[in-house]
Image: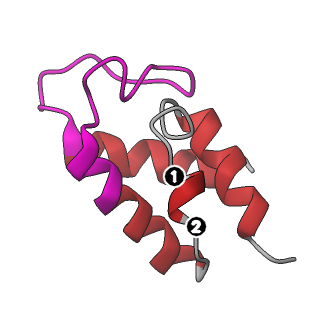
Amino acid sequence: MDELKEVIKNYVTDEYLEPDSDPIDYETPLISGGIVDSFSMVSLKRFLENKYQIQIPDEKATPEAFDSVNKIAELVKEFVKG
């Protein structure tokens, strides 16, 4: 689980934060905090689906479900087998 959180945190940091931005943690508000927008959320969802060979239904991919690293990790865990 910690590895999953680190993968998500690193992806968000690398893709969406400016180099001089404050670092994020597992509870940083990503969508409500303006770090991730709706377009970015789609690319993050696609990244996770490809990396973990899962399919996250669109109805589960809500802004609330993508609003922190912890929430995203919980969502991904629902669909990862094993």
**8 to the left or right of 74:** left
Q: Position of residue 1 (x, y in %)?
A: 75, 51
Q: Position of residue 56 (x, y in %)?
A: 58, 67
Q: Position of residue 81 (x, y in %)?
A: 81, 77
Which residue appears at 50% of the width and 54% of the height?
7
Whether 57 is drawn above or below 14: the answer is below
Which residue appears at 56% of the width and 56% of the height?
59
Q: Quadrant of the C terminus?
A: bottom right
Q: Amino acid at mark 1?
A: Ala
**31 to the left or right of 20:** right
Res 56 label: 2
Res 21 label: none
The image shows a total of numbered marks equal to: 2
- The answer to whether residue 3 of the structure is visible from this angle is no
Q: Amino acid at mark 2?
A: Ile
Mark 2 to mark 1 CA distance (whole Å):
7 Å
Which residue appears at 24% of the width and 38% of the height?
37
Task: Provide the major secondary structure of the magenta segment.
Answer: loop
Whether 50 is drawn above or below 27: the answer is below
Marked residue nearer the N-terminal end (2 or 1): 2
Q: Are marks 2 and 1 in contact (CB under 8 Å)?
A: yes
- For the record, the magenta segment spans 16-43
Query: What secondary structure is found at the residue carrying circle 1?
Result: loop
**78 to the left or right of 70:** right
Q: Residues within 10 Å of mark 2 (few under 14, many from 20)?
A: some
- The answer to whether residue 75 of the structure is visible from this angle is yes
Query: What secondary structure is found at the residue carrying circle 2?
Result: loop
Res 61 label: 1
Q: Position of residue 22 (x, y in %)?
A: 27, 16
